[in-house]
Amino acid sequence: MRAQGKKRYKPKGQGYTGINLFPQTLDELRNMSGGFGEAAVADVQWGAVAACLMSDRNFSNPWQVVSVSVQHCRSEDRLRLRWPDYLGRKQTRAFLDLSPQSKREARLVGAETLADWRVAGCPYLDSDRIKRTYLYIQSCIRNTAEAEQNNIKEKAV
């Protein structure tokens, strides 16, 4: 243990370089999330848009329409991009009762809302939200690997 007041030895001209263990940007999240990169990025963005809806109501469309559209688009992206589930459950289609025209309109409003959010400077998109999504993805990957190992052990017995 170091005595109080003594500094750790640091050679001259050599600084310590800090590394980030967690992604700080969407590109880092995409690259560090393996096969779930695109799903992770989309989910972070929709999560930030949903958080923005809670405090800001300055969107091109009425708030109620935007809210339902964001939920629909997030669910559809999770299904399309194969968002992982920690317990291994399959994603189900949300909004099955919507007509094809309603689904198209929801996607259109979702795209407009995403554009409004980007124009506003991507509020609520921060490194903490990115980190939480990354940790969730990693825990799903770990849980799936452990479940597969347990299955192999059970078959061997």
Image: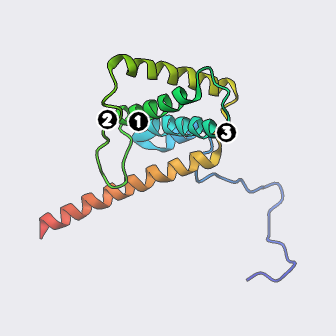
Q: Quadrant of residue 49?
A: top right
Tags 2 and 1 touching, CB below 8 Å: yes
First along the sequence among labels 3 and 2: 3
Relative vertical location of residue 22 with respect to residue 47 in this rendering, above or below: below
Q: Mark 2 falls on what kind of element?
A: loop
From the top left corner, tell me how far across and down residue 83 is, in percent.
39, 41
Please indicate whether residue 153 sits to the left or right of residue 12 in the image.
left
Query: Type of residue at label 2?
Result: Arg
Q: Is residue 4 visible?
A: yes
Neighbour tally class for label 3: few under 14, some 14-19, many 20 plus, Cα within 10 Å: few
Q: Which residue is mark 3?
A: 55
Query: Type of residue at label 1?
Result: Ser
Q: Which mark is residue 75?
A: 1
Tags 1 and 3 touching, CB below 8 Å: no
From the top left corner, tell me how far across and down residue 64 is, in percent.
54, 30
Relative vertical location of residue 39 with respect to residue 1 in this rendering, above or below: above
Neighbour tally class for label 2: few under 14, some 14-19, many 20 plus, Cα within 10 Å: few
- Quarter of the image with the C terminus is bottom left
Relative vertical location of residue 9 with respect to residue 75 in this rendering, above or below: below
In 3D space, how far apart are the residues under numbered discs 3 and 2 (Cα atoms)? 28 Å
In 3D space, how far apart are the residues under numbered discs 2 and 1 (Cα atoms)? 7 Å
Q: Mark 3 falls on what kind of element?
A: helix
Please indicate whether residue 131 sits to the left or right of residue 55 in the image.
left
From the top left corner, tell me how far across and down residue 78 is, in percent.
40, 37
Q: Nearer the viewer, residue 92 or 45?
A: 92
Q: Mark 1 falls on what kind of element?
A: helix
Q: Residue at x 31, y 35 (%)?
A: 93
Q: Which mark is residue 93?
A: 2
Neighbour tally class for label 1: few under 14, some 14-19, many 20 plus, Cα within 10 Å: many
In 3D space, how far apart are the residues under numbered discs 1 and 3 (Cα atoms)? 22 Å
Please indicate whether residue 156 sits to the left or right of residue 73 in the image.
left
